[in-house]
Amino acid sequence: MDCLFCAIVAGDIPSRQVYADAAAVAFLDINPWKRGHTLVIPRRHVDDLLAADEALTEIAAAINATARLLVDRLGADGVNLLSSAGAVAGQEVFHLHVHLVPRYADDPGLRAVTDRVAGIDLDEVAAALAGAGSSGGAGR
Ligand code: AMP
Ligand code: ZN
């Protein structure tokens, strides 16, 4: 199957991985809405949250651990979760992913979630998040 996120899990396409466990991988979104915008995905291919009832449960621990990491390492004041199922919902990559969006007091509110912040240095953010728990392995 030709899937971008399966290729990231396999390490065939580089990513800035910030967390991983047996079921899930978390890596920085390449075009972030906010500093630290991270995607959490299951290692196995699932199209979206409607495609397999248990898939979200499988990655729940990784979602929690990554959210905690974003607060502890980046100083986020809050976090939004978003997962789109289906093109009509805005899904563009058809491998289940949960957007974890750190939020900061100087840019509050639900309507501002997808307003991009200019000039985010992904390598700097990855360095700030490096070395957590069971992160490492594929990616960089
Ligand atoms: P969605 O629109 O919910 O399907 O989200 C797909 C997300 O994947 C977007 O926010 C993209 O910026 C992100 N994305 C696409 N390609 C990559 C990549 N190679 N590495 C990291 N994130 C990516
Ligand atoms: Zn996939």
Image (cartoon, rainbow, N blue to C red):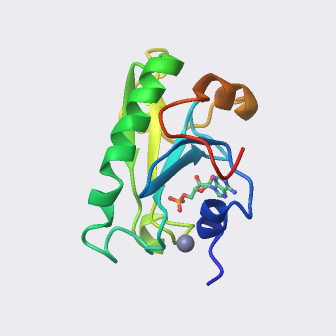
Quadrant housing the N terminus: bottom right
Name the side, left or right, on which 105 lies relative to 12.
left
Quadrant housing the C terminus: top right
Q: Quadrant of residue 34?
A: top right
Whole-percent x, y for residue 11 in the image: 69, 60
Q: Residue at x 49, y 66 (%)?
A: 91
Q: Is residue 119 visible?
A: no
- Asked if 27 appears above or below 41 in the picture, the reply is above
Whole-percent x, y for residue 132 in the image: 52, 30
Name the side, left or right, on which 120 lies relative to 82.
right
Q: Is residue 60 visible?
A: yes
Q: Residue at x 66, y 67 (%)?
A: 7
Seen from this angle, which residue lies furthest bottom? 1
Residue closer to the observer: 2 or 114 = 2
- Asked if 128 appears above or below 89 in the picture, the reply is above
Q: Residue at x 40, y 56 (%)?
A: 83
